[in-house]
Amino acid sequence: MKSIGARMLVRGLAFSLSLVFAACSGGVTATPSAPAPVTKPQIKHVFTIILENQSYSNTFGATMPVPYLTQTAAAQGATLQNYYGTSHFSLGNYISLVSGQAVTTANQDDCTVSAIPNTGSEWTNVVQTSLGSYNQVQGTGCVYPAAVTTVADELSAAGYTWKGYMEDMGNDPTREAATCGSPIKGLGYPDNTSTAQVPPNYNEGGTEKVTDQYAARHNPFTYFHSLLDSGACAQHVVPLSSSTLPVDLEQIATTPNYVWITPNLCDDGHDVPCKTPGSPTTQTAENAFLAKWVPIITRSPAFQQDGLLIINFDEASPAVTSALGANTSGYDASSCCSEPSGENTNTPGEGPLGKAYASLGLLSFTGDGSGGGRTGAILISPFIKPGTVSSVGYNHYYVLRSIEDYFGLSYLGYSAYPGTTDFGTDVFGSTIQRYAITL
């Protein structure tokens, strides 16, 4: 047992040390320091190129390779190995990317009239019956009421600029207008830009004219009355050509803060095989598209200053059997990241049209029907270390959440769902640095 004198000496030393700590901390008592905040890149120009209908094993494997994407672009950015679509078929994914809305059964079926009676739908207004959690619309139909806003609406309201560039849009004025690109027949009629581009037809290259391979269902801005009724869609959604995007990118002042790019049905990898003259295989056209447009983006002043390029896919396709053809078995309908199914279906990965085709033996699904399957994605930015590889799970709602964070916007729909975050340190690193982009 220590003596009283020894105990007093220990207490005195402890008190003296506490005074030293207090002096150093500027207060009477020392407090633990707060964790250092996670540094985020100051991104103010986001570019998105959305490709079509390929699973990760196709694109990043040996069967359906797109070497410019998986080798050249990946070497200059980050590969997201576990990026997922949110639904089948196409349109629901595009809707999720710009609004955070989960599918209605109509846009789940691409808002087309199917060759199978009573399984498709027309290009119609959403008839809303209620509003669920996270402002999810419960109802049927395709075009959302004006109260449902998009990231484009939010950007405009916050003083930022945006623009959509759609390849082939307006080439045939009997199908769609040269700006905005809504189906020319209007609401209540079949979408004549895509009726022939649903399974199983696209496995034969579809039947659309090779001069106009635009599909409205790959243009999400034409499905929101908030953009249609205000004229914003007609003002901000234009054809992709040498006289539009490259001219806009010449100066930072003329570069939109948010750029959306949709290739045509050949260049996005949708049609297998591609029927465009001079492109004997789909990956040839897709590869050439990326090799042309990605450097135009990455060499632009705005991208070099504070840009992020996202190259992703809408949904995973069945496994292709060769470079010139595909089968329709095994649609990957899995999901990641605890994706919520939404208010209108428990199986966003399996809609009425898909189930009808499955019942006839024309296609099948793998997974539990909870999402659009694993596709992978590539991110390129001066703030991303070249050759980065991430195994973290992401989906379309995470992309929307990231964009909203970069511009200080409110979270729309399921971008606010618990656990949904923006791209993290697995992509940008724990300390933000600048790297040279040589594409």
Image: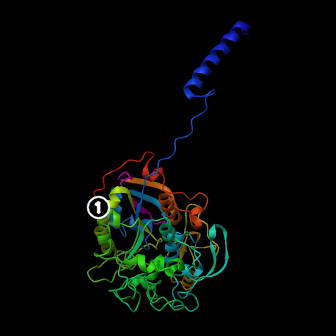
**Residue 98 inside the magenta-drawn segment:** no
Instruction: Tell me where residue 285 appears, x and y as whole percent.
Output: 31, 75
Q: Residue at image x 47%, y 92%?
A: 185
In the visual, does 138 lie left or right of 54? right
Label tally: 1
Q: Which one is in front, 199 or 312?
A: 312
Residue 302 appears in the rendering: yes
Q: Which one is in front, 37 or 373?
A: 37
Quadrant of residue 286 within the rendered picture = bottom left
In the visual, does 188 lie left or right of 29? left
Q: Residue at image x 29%, y 67%?
A: 291
- Provide the residue span drawn in magenta: 374-386
Quadrant of residue 50 within the rendered picture = bottom left
Instruction: Tell me where residue 131 appears, x and y as whole percent.
Output: 66, 74
Above or below: residue 221 compared with residue 195: above
In the visual, does 99 lie left or right of 287? right
Residue 67 appears in the rendering: no
Above or below: residue 174 compared with residue 345: below
Residue occupied by mark 1: 299
Q: Quadrant of the N terminus?
A: top right
Looking at the rendered structure, the secondary structure element under dot 1 is loop
**Residue 385 inside the magenta-drawn segment:** yes
Q: Quadrant of the C terminus?
A: bottom left
Q: Residue at image x 70%, y 11%?
A: 7
Q: Amino acid at mark 1?
A: Arg
Instruction: Tell me where residue 350 appears, x and y as whole percent.
Output: 57, 76
